[in-house]
Image (cartoon, rainbow, N blue to C red):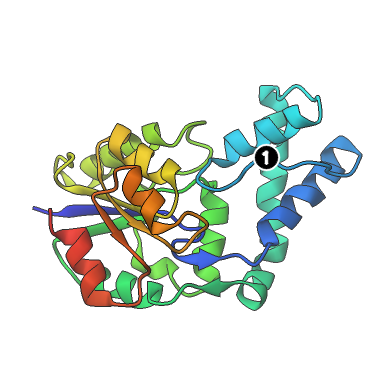
Amino acid sequence: MRTLVLWDIDHTLINAGGVGREAYAAVFQQVIGRPLERHAEMAGRTDRAITAETLLLHDIEPTGDLITTFTALLAESFATRRHELAVRGRVLAGAHAALRALADRPDVVQSVLTGNMEPIARYKLLAFGLDGFVDFQVGAYGMDGVERHPLVRLARQRAERKYGQVFDESTTVLIGDTPHDVRAGHEGGARVVAVATGSTPASALRACGAERVIPDLTDTETVLEAILTP
């Protein structure tokens, strides 16, 4: 019986060093023809939702065609900036060791549950040498939906099809750093391990109902125990 481990990316595994906000601003200027004045909240949200709200904040109707055009250019913008990620960003302490330790276990399927669209998720993990530890085919991404919690069910379904096993609440674990991650895990059918490596303090993550809260990923044994112990 395998455990499906789903990682959030930003502020859980890496810090992108502001590259994402710059990419959004550049694409907004390119598509809309004027500077970006306000940006929707990004933490714990999907690229689809962030793009739509950012457009609305500028009194622009986020039609389906506009969202498609905007996000396609956003992926291209990240492609041109992918080398900046490794220079300006950083992998968070302990992330590489935790991913590697889980990847070595035959009883774990490891992937991502992220608000990033798939190409951007790949660029971010590739920049820090983390891409080889996860199965991107069974992850769920920021263009798969507006809200995060349906993405958990989608990732479970993708893993079930590939690995021939039912992944339920007892065998699915989501690791993230925001209240959005905690809520998504619970509503999508996963146990949640929250890490206080983002802007949300440990006390608030506990108050949201995360089953386990750890300060960071630096102690690999603690990380594995939190993830693999029901």
Task: Name the residue that disc number 1 marks.
Answer: 40
User: Please, is residue 214 above or below residue 50 in the view?
Assistant: below
Could you tell me which residue is drawn at 21 percent across and 75 percent down? 221
154 lies above or below 139: above
On screen, residue 95 versus residue 164, left or right, reads: right
Q: Where residue 141 appears, x then y in whole percent?
A: 47, 44
Q: Is residue 140 above or below residue 12?
A: above
Q: Please, what secondary structure does the residue beneath circle 1 have?
A: loop
Q: Residue furthest right?
A: 34
The kind of residue tagged 1 is Ala
Q: Quadrant of residue 152?
A: top left
User: Left or right: 84 with respect to 9?
Assistant: right
Image quarter of residue 135:
bottom left
Q: Nearer the viewer, residue 173 or 162?
A: 173
Q: Position of residue 127 (x, y in %)?
A: 55, 71
In the displayed structure, would residue 220 be above or below residue 76?
A: below
Is 26 situated left or right of 188 in this image?
A: right
Residue at x-position 34% and y-position 45%: 207
Would you call the spot at circle 1 few (<14 residues within 10 Å), some (14-19), or many (20 or more)?
some
Residue positioned 67% across, 42% down in the render: 72
Q: Is residue 154 visible?
A: yes
Q: Position of residue 56 (x, y in %)?
A: 74, 27
Q: Position of residue 111 (x, y in %)?
A: 34, 55
Q: How many marks?
A: 1
